[in-house]
Image (cartoon, rainbow, N blue to C red):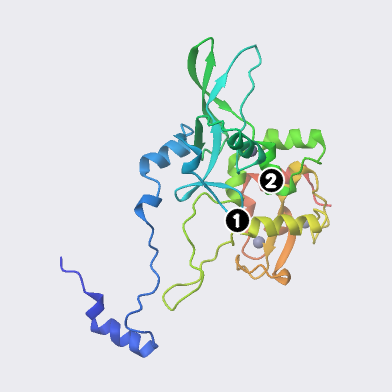
Amino acid sequence: MKLVDFLNFEPLNRLKDEMGIPRDAYGSFAITVDAGRLTLSELEALTSGDGIEISFNELTVLQDGTLAYKDSRVLLYIRDVHEYGSAPREPKYHLANCSTLQDMQSKGRFERYVIATEVTGTFKLNIISKNVKRSERRRLHVCQNCLTDIGFDGFSRDDDREQRRQYVGAFTPDRFFDVYPRSLHVKKPSHTAFTAPLNDYTPDFPEISTTLRSRAGWRCEICRRELSELRLRKYLHVHHKDGVKSNNSPANLQVLCMRCHAEAPNHSHLKQLPAYKAYLAEHPPL
Ligand SMILES: [Zn+2]
Ligand SMILES: [Zn+2]
Ligand SMILES: [Zn+2]
Protein backbone atom coordinates (compact mmCIF):
# COMPACT_ATOMS: atom_id res chain seq x y z
CA MET A 1 0.00 0.00 0.00
CA LYS A 2 1.32 3.41 -0.90
CA LEU A 3 0.82 6.04 1.80
CA VAL A 4 0.05 9.60 0.79
CA ASP A 5 2.86 12.02 1.56
CA PHE A 6 0.84 14.74 3.25
CA LEU A 7 3.74 17.20 3.03
CA ASN A 8 3.26 17.27 -0.73
CA PHE A 9 -0.41 16.40 -0.93
CA GLU A 10 -1.74 19.30 -2.97
CA PRO A 11 -5.47 19.02 -2.12
CA LEU A 12 -4.59 19.35 1.59
CA ASN A 13 -2.13 22.18 0.95
CA ARG A 14 -4.70 24.10 -1.10
CA LEU A 15 -7.23 23.61 1.68
CA LYS A 16 -4.71 24.92 4.20
CA ASP A 17 -4.01 27.96 2.04
CA GLU A 18 -7.73 28.68 1.83
CA MET A 19 -8.09 28.33 5.57
CA GLY A 20 -5.05 30.49 6.22
CA ILE A 21 -3.16 27.69 7.95
CA PRO A 22 0.61 27.58 7.38
CA ARG A 23 1.67 24.68 5.19
CA ASP A 24 3.97 23.32 7.87
CA ALA A 25 1.21 23.12 10.47
CA TYR A 26 -0.28 19.66 10.98
CA GLY A 27 -2.55 20.24 13.92
CA SER A 28 -1.72 18.66 17.24
CA PHE A 29 -1.73 14.93 17.15
CA ALA A 30 -1.60 13.17 20.48
CA ILE A 31 1.96 11.98 20.73
CA THR A 32 2.86 9.95 23.77
CA VAL A 33 6.25 8.49 24.47
CA ASP A 34 6.00 4.72 24.38
CA ALA A 35 8.09 4.31 27.52
CA GLY A 36 5.57 6.50 29.31
CA ARG A 37 2.64 4.21 28.64
CA LEU A 38 1.55 1.18 30.60
CA THR A 39 2.17 -2.08 28.83
CA LEU A 40 -0.77 -4.42 28.47
CA SER A 41 0.59 -6.81 31.12
CA GLU A 42 1.15 -3.89 33.50
CA LEU A 43 -2.41 -2.74 32.92
CA GLU A 44 -3.71 -6.22 33.69
CA ALA A 45 -1.60 -6.53 36.84
CA LEU A 46 -2.80 -3.12 38.04
CA THR A 47 -6.50 -3.63 37.43
CA SER A 48 -6.71 -7.24 38.63
CA GLY A 49 -5.55 -6.42 42.14
CA ASP A 50 -2.32 -8.41 41.71
CA GLY A 51 -0.50 -5.12 41.63
CA ILE A 52 3.07 -4.30 40.58
CA GLU A 53 6.00 -4.17 42.96
CA ILE A 54 7.82 -0.93 42.66
CA SER A 55 10.32 1.32 44.38
CA PHE A 56 9.03 4.68 45.48
CA ASN A 57 11.28 6.64 43.12
CA GLU A 58 9.62 5.02 40.11
CA LEU A 59 6.48 6.94 41.03
CA THR A 60 5.56 10.49 40.17
CA VAL A 61 3.88 12.68 42.74
CA LEU A 62 1.42 14.78 40.76
CA GLN A 63 0.70 18.43 41.49
CA ASP A 64 -2.53 17.52 43.24
CA GLY A 65 -0.58 15.23 45.60
CA THR A 66 -1.84 11.98 44.05
CA LEU A 67 0.49 9.27 42.73
CA ALA A 68 1.21 8.18 39.18
CA TYR A 69 3.08 5.41 37.45
CA LYS A 70 3.75 6.12 33.78
CA ASP A 71 0.45 7.47 32.38
CA SER A 72 -1.80 6.13 35.12
CA ARG A 73 -2.86 7.35 38.54
CA VAL A 74 -2.30 4.55 41.02
CA LEU A 75 -2.98 3.44 44.55
CA LEU A 76 -0.09 2.34 46.74
CA TYR A 77 0.09 -0.21 49.53
CA ILE A 78 2.59 -2.39 51.36
CA ARG A 79 2.18 -6.03 50.56
CA ASP A 80 3.92 -7.80 53.42
CA VAL A 81 1.84 -8.13 56.56
CA HIS A 82 3.50 -9.61 59.62
CA GLU A 83 1.13 -11.56 61.78
CA TYR A 84 2.26 -11.84 65.37
CA GLY A 85 -0.80 -12.12 67.51
CA SER A 86 -4.36 -12.96 66.65
CA ALA A 87 -5.24 -9.54 65.30
CA PRO A 88 -2.85 -8.52 62.51
CA ARG A 89 -2.47 -4.86 61.70
CA GLU A 90 -3.97 -4.43 58.30
CA PRO A 91 -2.17 -2.08 55.98
CA LYS A 92 -4.02 0.83 54.42
CA TYR A 93 -3.90 1.75 50.81
CA HIS A 94 -2.75 5.23 49.87
CA LEU A 95 -4.14 7.65 47.29
CA ALA A 96 -1.59 10.38 47.72
CA ASN A 97 1.90 11.16 48.96
CA CYS A 98 0.46 11.59 52.45
CA SER A 99 2.22 12.41 55.69
CA THR A 100 2.52 8.67 56.50
CA LEU A 101 4.39 7.96 53.27
CA GLN A 102 6.56 11.05 53.59
CA ASP A 103 7.40 10.02 57.12
CA MET A 104 8.42 6.55 55.97
CA GLN A 105 10.59 8.03 53.23
CA SER A 106 12.34 10.36 55.61
CA LYS A 107 13.06 7.50 58.00
CA GLY A 108 14.55 5.54 55.11
CA ARG A 109 12.00 2.77 55.40
CA PHE A 110 11.89 1.38 51.92
CA GLU A 111 9.29 -1.29 52.16
CA ARG A 112 8.07 -3.32 49.28
CA TYR A 113 5.57 -0.96 47.76
CA VAL A 114 2.92 -2.28 45.46
CA ILE A 115 0.82 -0.18 43.10
CA ALA A 116 -2.65 -1.09 41.90
CA THR A 117 -5.71 0.46 40.31
CA GLU A 118 -8.17 -2.17 41.46
CA VAL A 119 -11.53 -0.47 42.09
CA THR A 120 -13.15 -2.49 44.87
CA GLY A 121 -10.28 -2.11 47.34
CA THR A 122 -9.35 -5.80 47.39
CA PHE A 123 -5.61 -6.36 47.25
CA LYS A 124 -3.21 -9.26 47.23
CA LEU A 125 -1.21 -9.46 50.45
CA ASN A 126 1.62 -11.60 51.72
CA ILE A 127 0.74 -12.73 55.23
CA ILE A 128 3.90 -13.66 57.06
CA SER A 129 3.52 -15.60 60.27
CA LYS A 130 6.22 -17.64 61.98
CA ASN A 131 8.36 -17.45 58.84
CA VAL A 132 5.59 -18.93 56.72
CA LYS A 133 4.36 -16.75 53.91
CA ARG A 134 1.01 -17.14 52.28
CA SER A 135 -0.85 -15.06 49.71
CA GLU A 136 -4.29 -13.77 50.43
CA ARG A 137 -6.67 -11.21 49.00
CA ARG A 138 -8.16 -8.83 51.50
CA ARG A 139 -10.29 -5.78 51.38
CA LEU A 140 -8.26 -2.90 52.78
CA HIS A 141 -9.32 0.49 54.06
CA VAL A 142 -8.17 3.76 52.61
CA CYS A 143 -5.55 5.79 54.52
CA GLN A 144 -7.19 8.64 56.44
CA ASN A 145 -4.09 10.81 56.11
CA CYS A 146 -4.40 10.58 52.32
CA LEU A 147 -8.07 11.63 52.46
CA THR A 148 -7.14 14.52 54.75
CA ASP A 149 -4.15 15.65 52.70
CA ILE A 150 -6.05 15.90 49.42
CA GLY A 151 -9.23 17.01 51.22
CA PHE A 152 -11.29 14.32 49.50
CA ASP A 153 -14.98 15.21 50.02
CA GLY A 154 -13.65 17.75 52.48
CA PHE A 155 -12.48 14.90 54.72
CA SER A 156 -10.61 16.12 57.76
CA ARG A 157 -9.17 14.73 60.99
CA ASP A 158 -11.51 17.16 62.77
CA ASP A 159 -14.53 15.25 61.52
CA ASP A 160 -16.39 13.14 64.02
CA ARG A 161 -14.59 9.84 64.64
CA GLU A 162 -17.67 7.70 64.03
CA GLN A 163 -18.47 9.56 60.80
CA ARG A 164 -14.93 8.99 59.60
CA ARG A 165 -15.13 5.29 60.47
CA GLN A 166 -18.36 4.90 58.47
CA TYR A 167 -16.99 6.86 55.54
CA VAL A 168 -13.76 4.87 55.35
CA GLY A 169 -15.65 1.58 55.80
CA ALA A 170 -17.79 2.31 52.74
CA PHE A 171 -15.07 3.98 50.66
CA THR A 172 -13.85 2.12 47.57
CA PRO A 173 -11.19 3.22 45.05
CA ASP A 174 -13.73 3.60 42.23
CA ARG A 175 -14.97 6.68 44.07
CA PHE A 176 -11.43 8.09 44.03
CA PHE A 177 -10.94 7.34 40.33
CA ASP A 178 -14.31 8.99 39.57
CA VAL A 179 -12.88 12.25 40.83
CA TYR A 180 -9.22 11.70 39.94
CA PRO A 181 -9.22 9.74 36.65
CA ARG A 182 -6.75 6.93 36.18
CA SER A 183 -5.75 7.96 32.70
CA LEU A 184 -3.28 10.85 32.57
CA HIS A 185 -3.22 11.27 28.83
CA VAL A 186 -2.29 14.86 28.29
CA LYS A 187 -5.10 17.15 27.27
CA LYS A 188 -4.40 19.84 24.70
CA PRO A 189 -4.28 23.23 26.40
CA SER A 190 -5.63 25.09 23.38
CA HIS A 191 -7.62 24.34 20.29
CA THR A 192 -6.52 24.58 16.70
CA ALA A 193 -8.57 24.32 13.55
CA PHE A 194 -7.93 20.59 13.65
CA THR A 195 -8.75 19.81 17.26
CA ALA A 196 -12.18 20.19 18.74
CA PRO A 197 -12.20 21.18 22.39
CA LEU A 198 -12.44 18.16 24.64
CA ASN A 199 -15.41 18.25 26.94
CA ASP A 200 -13.60 17.21 30.07
CA TYR A 201 -13.02 18.35 33.62
CA THR A 202 -9.96 20.44 34.39
CA PRO A 203 -7.29 18.93 36.67
CA ASP A 204 -8.19 21.34 39.47
CA PHE A 205 -11.90 20.47 39.37
CA PRO A 206 -11.79 18.15 42.42
CA GLU A 207 -10.47 21.03 44.48
CA ILE A 208 -12.94 23.54 43.05
CA SER A 209 -15.80 21.13 43.69
CA THR A 210 -14.85 20.54 47.33
CA THR A 211 -14.38 24.25 48.01
CA LEU A 212 -17.71 25.11 46.42
CA ARG A 213 -19.70 22.39 48.16
CA SER A 214 -18.15 23.22 51.50
CA ARG A 215 -18.89 26.95 51.00
CA ALA A 216 -22.50 26.03 50.20
CA GLY A 217 -22.67 24.33 53.60
CA TRP A 218 -22.90 20.95 51.78
CA ARG A 219 -26.44 21.91 50.75
CA CYS A 220 -28.24 21.53 47.41
CA GLU A 221 -28.97 24.90 45.80
CA ILE A 222 -32.35 23.75 44.53
CA CYS A 223 -34.02 21.54 47.14
CA ARG A 224 -31.83 22.78 50.02
CA ARG A 225 -31.15 19.25 51.27
CA GLU A 226 -28.13 19.23 53.57
CA LEU A 227 -25.61 16.48 52.90
CA SER A 228 -22.76 17.49 55.19
CA GLU A 229 -22.34 14.11 56.81
CA LEU A 230 -19.12 12.62 55.39
CA ARG A 231 -20.69 9.49 53.98
CA LEU A 232 -23.41 11.56 52.22
CA ARG A 233 -21.14 14.09 50.52
CA LYS A 234 -20.73 11.88 47.47
CA TYR A 235 -24.39 12.58 46.68
CA LEU A 236 -23.67 16.28 46.36
CA HIS A 237 -22.38 17.24 42.92
CA VAL A 238 -21.15 20.36 41.20
CA HIS A 239 -23.03 20.88 37.94
CA HIS A 240 -21.81 22.82 34.88
CA LYS A 241 -24.90 24.72 33.71
CA ASP A 242 -23.72 25.16 30.10
CA GLY A 243 -22.63 21.53 29.84
CA VAL A 244 -19.01 22.53 29.25
CA LYS A 245 -17.08 20.65 31.90
CA SER A 246 -14.03 22.86 31.59
CA ASN A 247 -15.96 26.08 32.20
CA ASN A 248 -15.45 26.60 35.92
CA SER A 249 -16.53 30.23 36.05
CA PRO A 250 -18.56 30.72 39.25
CA ALA A 251 -21.73 31.66 37.33
CA ASN A 252 -21.57 28.36 35.46
CA LEU A 253 -21.35 26.15 38.54
CA GLN A 254 -24.16 24.95 40.74
CA VAL A 255 -24.10 22.71 43.82
CA LEU A 256 -26.80 20.08 43.38
CA CYS A 257 -27.87 16.92 45.13
CA MET A 258 -27.98 13.87 42.93
CA ARG A 259 -31.76 13.99 42.56
CA CYS A 260 -31.80 17.62 41.37
CA HIS A 261 -28.70 17.07 39.22
CA ALA A 262 -30.37 14.18 37.39
CA GLU A 263 -33.26 16.55 36.48
CA ALA A 264 -30.90 18.95 34.64
CA PRO A 265 -31.09 18.85 30.81
CA ASN A 266 -29.25 15.87 29.27
CA HIS A 267 -28.54 14.37 32.68
CA SER A 268 -31.03 11.51 32.79
CA HIS A 269 -28.10 9.04 32.53
CA LEU A 270 -27.41 9.81 36.18
CA LYS A 271 -30.63 7.98 37.04
CA GLN A 272 -29.03 4.73 35.86
CA LEU A 273 -26.32 4.89 38.50
CA PRO A 274 -26.59 2.68 41.59
CA ALA A 275 -25.66 5.74 43.68
CA TYR A 276 -28.76 7.55 42.39
CA LYS A 277 -31.03 4.71 43.47
CA ALA A 278 -29.28 4.47 46.83
CA TYR A 279 -29.65 8.21 47.35
CA LEU A 280 -33.37 8.23 46.52
CA ALA A 281 -34.05 5.23 48.71
CA GLU A 282 -32.47 6.96 51.68
CA HIS A 283 -33.71 10.47 50.87
CA PRO A 284 -37.34 10.75 49.78
CA PRO A 285 -38.14 14.18 48.28
CA LEU A 286 -38.28 16.99 50.83
ZN1 LIG B 1 -1.77 7.70 53.05
ZN1 LIG C 1 -31.48 18.84 45.48
ZN1 LIG D 1 -24.24 18.43 35.56
Residue drawn at 34 percent across, 85 percent down: 16
Give the number of callouts: 2
Q: Is mark 1 within 8 Å of ligand 3?
A: no
The residue pinned by badge 1 equals: 269
Residue 127 at x, y = what percent? 53, 18
Kind of residue at disc 2: Asp
Can you name the residue that lies furthest to the top here?
130
Quadrant where the image shows the N terminus: bottom left
The residue pinned by badge 2 equals: 149
Residue 139 falls in which quadrant of the image?
A: top right
* Residue situated in front as seen by the camera: 190 or 272: 190
Residue drawn at 38 percent across, 62 percent down: 31
Residue 171 at x, y = what percent? 66, 38
Residue 238 falls in which quadrant of the image?
A: bottom right
Residue drawn at 29 percent across, 87 percent down: 14
Answer with mark 2 or mark 1, whichever residue precedes in sequence: 2
Residue 244 at x, y = what percent? 60, 68
Q: Is mark 2 within 8 Å of ligand 1?
A: yes
Q: Quadrant of ligand 2?
A: bottom right
Kind of residue at disc 1: His
* Residue situated in front as seen by the camera: 100 or 171: 100
Residue 155 at x, y = what percent? 74, 44
| Kind of element beneath mark 1 | helix
Residue drawn at 53 percent across, 16 percent down: 128
